[in-house]
Image (spheres, rainbow, N blue to C red):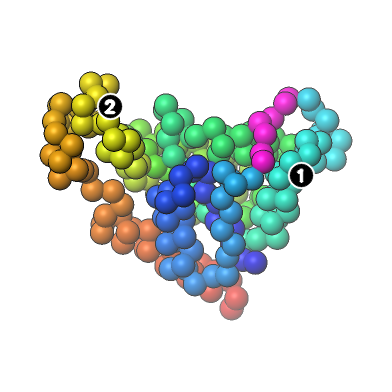
Amino acid sequence: MKAIGISSSGRKAAYSKIIVKDILEESGVEYEMIHLARLNIKGCLGCLKCAGNNTCVQKDDFQNVIDKINKAEVLVFGGGNYYGMLNAIGHAFWERTFALRHREVFPFAGKLGIAVGLDRDKDKKEATGFIEKMMLSNKMAVIATFTESGHQQCYDCGYGHDCAVGNVYAHMGLVTAQLAETNRPEEYGYEAQQKAKAIGKMLGSILDARKI
């Protein structure tokens, strides 16, 4: 398996999953897609029992994911911004990589990394920046980052058009449900899709060159 794609979103139709898959599909490499929300991965306990052998002692799905990444050359990780940071599922995963760094082991060192973040404010890049930071902390080679506006859930909850504290109100005020739907912001449009494909093409070229 050359590449592992990971989405930390809890949504079935998550853009982080779609974008990660688009990048990997365009690269042409063999890959496996992992959805962290389907797994049981707890946060770091700070117990330091990993210091002796760089293996977390918690009995959940974390080590299975690590084993797959260890066998791959590439990790493409995507997640959304919840309240100004990477969502809890993704954050828990990266917390647990603390277990890998004791005594300069760093099993991810040199692996190619691509960070995909769904951020409400694309200029701040809070989710993307955290993923990139954690990849670099694990001594990975980050070859690209991708930031796109996340899914606007206020347009789907059924109450957004009449809610004074949601994104619909922030965009256009209190409106009818029909007007809210008509003016729904574009999500992962053509330009963003082309950027994802360009990153995937670059990844494929890098890996092809390594075969020579």
Upstream in sequence: badge 1 or badge 2: 1
Question: Considering the image in quadrants, where does the C terminus appear?
Answer: bottom right
Q: Residue furthest top?
A: 164
Q: Is residue 35 left or right of residue 148?
A: right
Q: What residue is shown at x 27% (from left), y 21% (from top)?
A: 165
Q: Residue furthest bottom?
A: 212
Binning the other alpha carbons within 10 Å of mark 2 as few (below 14), some (14 to 19) or many (20 upward) gives some
| Location of mark 1 (residue) | 105
Q: What residue is shown at x 52% (from left), y 54% (from top)?
A: 76
Amino acid type of the residue tagged 1 in the rendering: Val
Q: Secondary structure at mark 1?
A: loop
- In the image, 172 versus 54, the foreground residue is 172
Whether pointer 1 and pointer 2 mark residues with C-beta atoms closer than 8 Å, the reply is no
Binning the other alpha carbons within 10 Å of mark 1 as few (below 14), some (14 to 19) or many (20 upward) gives few
Q: How many marks?
A: 2
Q: What residue is shown at x 76% (from left), y 44% (from top)?
A: 105
What secondary structure is the stretch in magenta mostly built from?
loop
Whether residue 123 is visible to the viewer of this picture, yes or no, is no
Gap in angstroms between the C-alphas marked 1 and 2: 46 Å
Whether residue 30 is visible to the viewer of this picture, yes or no, is yes
Mark toward the viewer: 1 or 2: 2
Q: Secondary structure at mark 2?
A: loop
Question: Considering the image in quadrants, where does the N terminus appear?
Answer: bottom right
- In the image, 209 versus 161, the foreground residue is 161
Q: What residue is shown at x 37% (from left), y 38% (from top)?
A: 119
Q: Position of residue 199 (x, y in %)?
A: 41, 60
| Location of mark 2 (residue) | 166
Q: Is residue 143 left or right of residue 103?
A: left
Q: Range of the magenta residues? A: 40-46
Amino acid type of the residue tagged 2 in the rendering: Gly
- In the image, 50 versus 158, the foreground residue is 158
